[in-house]
Amino acid sequence: MAGKLDWSDYEEIGEILHERMPEVDPLAVRFTDLKEWVCSLPEFGGNPETCNEKKLEAVQMAWVQAFQDEE
């Protein structure tokens, strides 16, 4: 699955981030760090240049959902 996810796959990206960093509160993550983490995922093949605040918010909210589901 390497390089298959794009920014539109925010729910899957949020799940992956939660699985890999379950101790991290997604609401405490800066968008600059979030972008870097998403782009460094082996599963991610999207273009970093097409990233914007709306896409990062979608990833963050999906990660928040996964984080809250664990509580």
Image (cartoon, grey):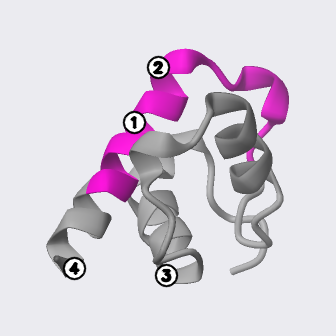
For discs 2 and 4, the disc positioned in front in the rendered view = 4
* Residue 19: mark in rendering: 3
**Residue visible at 17% across and 72% down?**
69
Relative to residue 71, is residue 59 drawn left or right? right
> Do the residues under discs 1 and 4 have CB atoms within 8 angstroms?
no
Q: Position of residue 43 (x, y in %)?
A: 71, 70
Mark 2 and mark 1: Cα distance apart in space: 6 Å
- Where is 55 relative to 69, above or below? above
For discs 3 and 4, the disc positioned in front in the rendered view = 4
> Which one is earlier in the sequence, the residue at label 2 or at label 3?
3
Residue 17 counted in the magenta span = no
**Residue visible at 39% across and 36% down?**
58
* Residue 58: mark in rendering: 1
Which type of secondary structure does the marked residue at label 1 adopt? helix
> Do the residues under discs 2 and 1 have CB atoms within 8 angstroms?
yes
Residue type beneath disc 1: Ala
> Which one is earlier in the sequence, the residue at label 3 or at label 4?
3
Classify 10 Å Cα crowding around label 2: few (below 14), some (14-19), many (20 and above). few
**Residue with the mark numbered 2:** 54
Residue 47 counted in the magenta span = yes
* Residue 70: mark in rendering: 4
Mark 2 and mark 3: Cα distance apart in space: 23 Å
